[in-house]
Image (cartoon, rainbow, N blue to C red):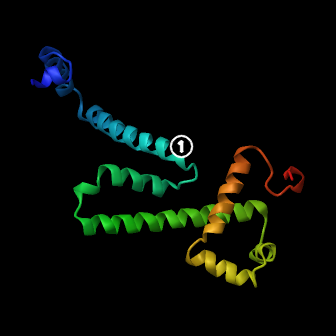
């Protein structure tokens, strides 16, 4: 089967497009290429955020890489890239946690008391190493409540 039949286009129209494209300035061609990549990234972000709206930018970019670039690298190189992207994602979670903590004006001591932990220092050390799952969940709940316009630190907004 002929290529032009496959894409349901005439050879003349494809040649006209190629001729038009060849006369474009390099800056315009580069922008078109960047826009094409950005479209792919945005599509993957949109679909992933439908499943999990709380993914970090690094997690979203890693998904794009896994879908589109994984085969372009040797397995050990891609494993290194994956490791670095997951480290970046962890840093993003920590930043989101600290932003939540700051916005709520909570100290580590107060947070430890709220959850029955022995001390704020142990909680701070735990967060510094790797943000625990419960802390990520707290960030998700906080961000969702904030998104919906509720005050996360106002007990009057809590329904029984």
- Answer with the quarter of the image where residue 25 lies: top left
* Residue lying at 21% horizontally and 26% vertically, measured from the top left: 21
The answer to which of 2 and 144 lies nearer the viewer is: 2
x, y percent for residue 110: 80, 74
Q: Is residue 145 above or below residue 110?
A: above
The reply, left or right, for residue 157 in relation to residue 125 is right
Farthest residue toward the right?
Answer: 156
Residue drawn at 85 percent across, 53 percent down: 158
Q: Is residue 55 left or right of residue 77?
A: right
Q: Position of residue 125 (x, y in %)?
A: 63, 81
Relative to 105, residue 157 above or below: above
Q: Residue furthest left?
A: 1
The number of numbered badges drawn on the structure is 1
Residue 91 x, y percent position in the rendering: 53, 66
**Circle 1 sits in a helix, a strand or a loop, which is it?**
helix
Q: Position of residue 26 (x, y in %)?
A: 24, 35
**157 vs 103, nearest the viewer:** 157
Q: Residue at x 65, y 64 (%)?
A: 97
Report the residue at 40% width, 56% height from top: 62
Q: Quick check: 118 above or below 54?
A: below
Decide: few, some or many residues near mark 1? Use Cα within 10 Å; few <14, some 14-19, many ≥20: few
Quadrant including the N terminus: top left
Residue placed under numbered mark 1 in the picture: 50
Q: Quadrant of residue 139 in the image?
A: bottom right
């Amino acid at each position: 089967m002929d290529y032009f039949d496959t894409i349901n286009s005439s050879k003349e129209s494809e040649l006209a497009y190629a001729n038009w494209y060849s006369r474009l300035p390099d800056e315009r061609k580069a922008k078109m290429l960047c826009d094409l990549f950005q479209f792919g990234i945005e599509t993957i972000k949109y679909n992933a955020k439908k499943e999990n709206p709380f993914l970090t930018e690094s997690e979203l970019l890693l998904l794009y890489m896994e879908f589109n670039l994984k085969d372009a690298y040797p397995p050990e190189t891609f494993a290194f890239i994956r490791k670095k992207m997951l480290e970046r994602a962890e840093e993003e979670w920590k930043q989101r946690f600290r932003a939540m903590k700051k916005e709520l004006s909570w100290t580590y001591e107060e947070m430890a008391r709220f959850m029955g932990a022995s001390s704020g220092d142990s909680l701070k050390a735990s967060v510094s190493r790797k943000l625990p799952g419960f802390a990520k969940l707290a960030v998700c709940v906080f961000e969702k409540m904030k998104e919906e316009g509720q005050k996360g630190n106002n007990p009057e907004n809590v329904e029984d």
